């Protein structure tokens, strides 16, 4: 696969031209040496005029305009948000400066090895060279000279060959551009460029720095916030390289302190800012992905966890209690020895003690064993919080992966994980890689579950998942700083693919036709800056960043728009990066919003979307009238730019034009107001009688003559509630960061439904029985007998069935049994008092115009549904549901999907709401039939879970009760490959 580069993206070309235009008509002199750049006259007044003109035309905020001269070199700054094509821009800028002015010696400085690797890969790529030659029309060859560290050897000392090649490149050659690529450490931490004792040097230069200085280079700096002017690296650039010009490219720039006392303030350290493509503009122009933050809420709502920070020689363990109280994050450290109560750290651990401290693990009195670095949810019975986050990340990944495999040209999504403990992934001689092992188990489980859900049309995705199951280890890859000295060939292969093989990572099939299943990547912040991959859709932060770094830097690895399997960049669609954190960063979305809005300094442009929104708010229709008014009153020019002298007046009259990111770009997923679907009045009128009957509330009552012996009662209780073996449930919170365009146009946080994830923490069978006996006062032999009988007669019970969650589930149903004297016989009875408001109607019976899309379906198909369908959108949860919505069945008068959780039918396994409602008539219109359908996208009815079967049996009895009350409703369950038309025809007979 080759990346298909685009040559005329406006936001990139404006940045290229901004730099090139600075030197228009500026006096130039021919270099005295063949190997040096032409020299421009820094005293030429046209230089300042050009800078001011470029800043004005590109709407640079007024406070940053004017020539800034912080050093002897001319400084030029280009601000571009991560993911908008910064590497492409500075590469094209070098071509353009060479074409216009003959500059051909550029030194490109980056802060880290990973960034250097990605940049070198881009510059050396033959397809990139062809793009600039054939598509852009540059008649020159880029010659990348990548400088690497050298080990000092005994004997003769050879001048660095890469530096020699760069220096000897002639400026008199019109078809070659020389670029020396080096990382920061080579400027400051190495003697290679400083030494002068080499046996040979080009042009009689024996000190590399002296040779580079003589070329009169242009220096380009990537990630400028890593190069403070006071730092050694920047001072070395100024002193040792003595460049004519320093051009900085980045999303984040350094800050400096100005003033004293009350006037003391931090300001951005710009040097002639020429172009400002900030985060707000990048989001608004759909140049990058939107962001969804998601975190797990603590099951009890306590928002508390405990981290094992250090184990000291088997004698003591250091723990840190981390909790949130009234929006304040509190961290307290404790040191415990064997025998100490864990309640000293948190009351949530009452009854637990530190039983044993081993070399690398701690064993607690309930048998749970944890390692250094693990974080424990205090309210979740010692559940590993990181493992729950990994489970959530996998679920989110497979949602995106499955969706993108349905495209004509597929997109291969990647997931990225920042971890705290390298040994947890790589392992050591004395430790197993427990994190990797858990991840592989969870990965296998989720892929096996997903395979059972796939429709027949998803054959290729099925094959891809099967190939993944056959090579679970190959699905994962890691890169850590220590890997450069690692001898393990598998580690080296992972590192090479992640660090240097961006295109290989994105391919679905390898050259030999086999599937490339690697898509889950792990690192310890080594790749947090500079490295990115366009197809990262999920980032999970399992460790602290170690400092209060920019939130934009954290999400930046996954902001770039994705590419398909042919290397084409996919624009014009709404893509989102899911960023998973723990509850200590529950406010991540809000902080990201603040950071983005803080970066918006002035309103420089009004967009069409803003004009439409503001016009609607002020009752000005059509919106063109408002635009005409803004032009007439001199607020904007013909290019929709805000006139500086009228900006304050504009915002005073129409404050809604305040700059900010547009709606839907960044979300807090648990609390987002969902997208709406509209309810069609005509179909509803025909469904009204059925809908109102379905919404009448019923209670179920138990028969009073139940007298069974205790063992039999407990056994039946266990059989009917097999769902208790499914594990603990954790709920995530999702936050999407978006703009409130209708109000201020600035960023805000919207919440949307998160995810409920089952999670289990295993207990030994003996501990499991003792926990139940202690809580219920039931004899141990009795409990043992009913579980043995269950395993023999109902379903096998492996070790995975005995968990803390199973204990809590059994206790819950046992208490219900005590109150109701067994839940085995029951009947339904209508409640005397009914709810007046429903999901589709207000309390007065009036039809609601719309409802959240999430209540109807999580997926949306383009196009309009049939006129007799209840909604105006094709929203569904499974392929079977979509098939039902799109099926045009002749004798169906009207039909609709029943909103989620709207019809509350009480069952033994909880409340239940079916999926579809139909009103069916015979061809002659003489007979009308009300039908309710439950859809289950499984191959066989035997594949239904136990709790689903219980709910369906209860629902059958419920609809029998409706018939006894005088309202006939047919209820059926539909499974995969059963056509709705056949089901309805059978019911009409």
Image (cartoon, rainbow, N blue to C red):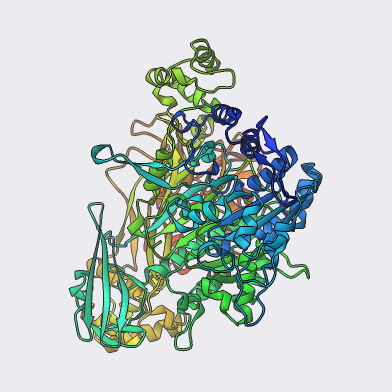
Q: Position of residue 650 (x, y in %)?
A: 43, 19
Q: Position of residue 347 (x, y in %)?
A: 19, 70
- Furthest toward the top, the residue is 632
Picture residue at 24% right of the left edge, 38% below the top:
262
Work out whether residue 548 can be spotted: yes
Q: Position of residue 257 (x, y in %)?
A: 35, 44
**For residue 543, which quarter of the picture?**
bottom left
Q: Is residue 213 above or below residue 80?
A: below
Q: Position of residue 541 (x, y in %)?
A: 44, 62
Q: Is residue 951 above or below residue 968?
A: below
Front residue of 198/481: it is 198
Front residue of 988/423: it is 423
Position of residue 751 in the picture relative to residue 23 (left or right): left
Front residue of 767/40: it is 40
Report the quarter where the N terminus lies.
Answer: bottom right
Position of residue 819 in the picture relative to residue 803 (left or right): left
Front residue of 96/126: it is 96
Question: How many labels, in total?
Answer: 0
**For residue 960, which quarter of the picture?**
bottom left
Work out whether residue 458 can be spotted: no
Picture residue at 50% right of the left edge, 33% below the top:
67
Q: Is residue 453 above or below residue 409?
A: below
Picture residue at 39% right of the left edge, 23% below the top:
655
Position of residue 924 in the picture relative to residue 250 (left or right): right
């Amino acid at each position: 696969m080759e990346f298909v580069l685009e040559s005329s993206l406006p936001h990139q070309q404006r940045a290229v031209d901004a730099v090139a235009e600075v030197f228009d008509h500026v006096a130039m002199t021919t270099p005295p040496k063949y190997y040096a750049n032409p020299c421009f006259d820094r005293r030429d007044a046209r230089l300042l005029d050009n800078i001011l003109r470029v800043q004005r035309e590109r709407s640079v905020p007024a406070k940053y305009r004017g020539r800034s001269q912080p050093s002897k070199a001319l400084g030029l700054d280009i601000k571009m948000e991560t993911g908008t094509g910064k590497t492409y821009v500075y590469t094209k800028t070098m071509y353009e400066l060479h074409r216009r002015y003959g500059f051909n010696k550029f030194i490109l400085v980056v802060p880290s090895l990973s960034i250097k690797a990605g940049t070198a890969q881009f510059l050396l790529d033959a397809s990139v060279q062809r793009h600039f030659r054939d598509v852009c029309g540059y008649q020159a060859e880029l010659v990348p000279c990548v400088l690497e560290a050298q080990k000092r050897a005994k004997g003769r000392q050879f001048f660095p060959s890469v530096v020699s090649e760069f220096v000897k490149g002639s400026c008199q050659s019109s078809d070659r551009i020389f670029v020396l690529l080096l990382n920061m450490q080579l400027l400051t931490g190495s003697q290679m460029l400083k030494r002068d004792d080499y046996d040979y040097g080009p042009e009689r230069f024996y000190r590399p720095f002296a040779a580079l200085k003589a070329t009169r280079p242009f220096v380009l700096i990537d990630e400028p916030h890593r190069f403070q002017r006071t730092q050694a690296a920047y001072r070395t650039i100024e002193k040792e390289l003595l460049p004519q010009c320093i051009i900085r490219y980045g999303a984040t720039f350094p800050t400096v302190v100005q003033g004293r006392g009350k006037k003391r303030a931090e300001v951005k350290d710009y040097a002639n800012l020429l172009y400002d493509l900030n985060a707000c503009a990048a989001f608004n122009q759909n140049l990058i992905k939107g962001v969804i933050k998601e975190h797990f809420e603590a099951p009890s709502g306590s928002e508390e966890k405990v981290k094992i920070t250090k184990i000291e020689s088997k004698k003591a363990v250091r723990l840190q209690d981390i909790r949130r109280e009234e929006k304040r994050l509190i961290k307290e450290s404790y040191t415990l020895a064997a025998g100490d109560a864990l309640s000293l750290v948190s009351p949530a651990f009452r009854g637990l003690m530190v039983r044993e401290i081993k070399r690398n693990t701690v064993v607690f009195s309930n048998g749970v064993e944890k390692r250094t670095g693990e974080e424990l949810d205090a309210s979740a019975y010692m559940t590993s919080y990181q493992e729950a986050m990994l489970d959530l990340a996998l679920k989110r990944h497979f949602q995106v992966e499955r969706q993108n495999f349905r495209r004509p040209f597929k997109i291969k999504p990647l997931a990225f994980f920042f971890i705290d403990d390298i040994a947890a992934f790589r392992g050591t001689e004395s430790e197993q890689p427990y994190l990797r092992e858990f991840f592989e188990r969870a990965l296998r489980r989720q892929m096996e579950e997903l395979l059972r859900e796939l429709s027949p049309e998803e054959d290729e995705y099925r094959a891809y998942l099967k190939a993944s199951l056959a090579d679970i280890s190959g699905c994962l890859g890691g890169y850590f700083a220590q890997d450069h000295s690692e001898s393990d060939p598998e580690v080296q292969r992972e590192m090479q693919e992640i660090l240097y093989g961006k295109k290989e990572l994105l391919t679905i099939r390898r050259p030999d036709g086999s599937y490339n299943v690697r898509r889950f990547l792990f690192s310890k912040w080594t790749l947090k800056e500079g490295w990115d991959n366009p197809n990262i859709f999920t980032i999970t932060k399992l460790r602290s960043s170690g400092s209060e770094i920019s939130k934009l830097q954290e999400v930046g690895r996954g902001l770039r728009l994705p590419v398909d399997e042919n290397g084409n960049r996919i624009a014009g669609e709404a893509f989102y990066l899911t960023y998973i954190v723990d509850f200590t960063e529950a406010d991540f979305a809000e902080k990201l919003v603040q950071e983005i809005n803080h970066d918006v300094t002035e309103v420089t442009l009004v967009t069409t979307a803003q004009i439409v929104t503001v016009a609607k708010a002020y009752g000005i229709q059509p919106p063109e009238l408002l635009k005409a008014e803004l032009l007439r009153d001199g607020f904007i020019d013909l290019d929709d730019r805000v006139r500086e002298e009228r900006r304050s007046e504009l915002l005073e009259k129409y404050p809604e034009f305040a700059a900010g990111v547009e709606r839907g770009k960044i979300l807090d997923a648990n609390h987002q107001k969902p997208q709406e679907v509209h309810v069609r009045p005509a179909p509803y009128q025909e469904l009204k009688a059925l809908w109102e009957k379905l919404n009448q509330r019923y209670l179920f009552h138990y028969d009073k003559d139940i007298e069974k012996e205790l063992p039999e009662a407990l056994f039946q209780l266990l059989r009917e509630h097999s769902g208790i073996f499914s594990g603990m449930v954790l709920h995530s919170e999702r936050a999407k960061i978006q703009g409130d365009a209708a109000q201020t146009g600035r960023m805000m946080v919207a919440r949307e439904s998160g995810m409920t994830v089952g999670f289990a923490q295993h207990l030994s069978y003996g501990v499991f029985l003792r926990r139940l006996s202690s809580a219920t006062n039931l004899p141990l032999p009795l409990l043992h007998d009913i579980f043995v009988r269950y395993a023999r007669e109902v379903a096998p019970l492996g070790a995975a069935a005995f968990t803390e969650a199973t204990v809590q589930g059994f206790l819950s149903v046992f208490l219900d049994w005590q109150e109701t004297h067994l839940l085995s016989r029951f009947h339904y009875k209508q409640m005397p008092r009914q709810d007046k408001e429903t999901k589709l109607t207000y309390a007065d019976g009036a039809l609601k115009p719309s409802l959240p899309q999430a209540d109807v379906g999580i997926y949306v198909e383009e196009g309009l549904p049939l006129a007799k369908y209840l909604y105006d959108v094709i929203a569904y949860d499974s392929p079977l549901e979509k098939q039902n919505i799109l099926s045009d069945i002749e004798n169906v008068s009207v039909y609709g999907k029943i909103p989620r959780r709207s019809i509350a039918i009480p069952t033994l396994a909880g409340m239940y709401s079916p999926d579809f409602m139909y009103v069916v008539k015979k061809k002659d219109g003489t007979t009308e039939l009300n039908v309710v359908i439950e859809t289950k996208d499984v191959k066989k009815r035997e594949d239904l879970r136990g709790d689903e079967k219980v709910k369906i049996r209860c629902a059958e009895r419920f609809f029998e009760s409706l018939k006894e009350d005088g309202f006939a409703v047919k209820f059926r369950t539909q499974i995969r490959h059963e056509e709705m038309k056949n089901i309805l025809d059978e019911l009409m007979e």
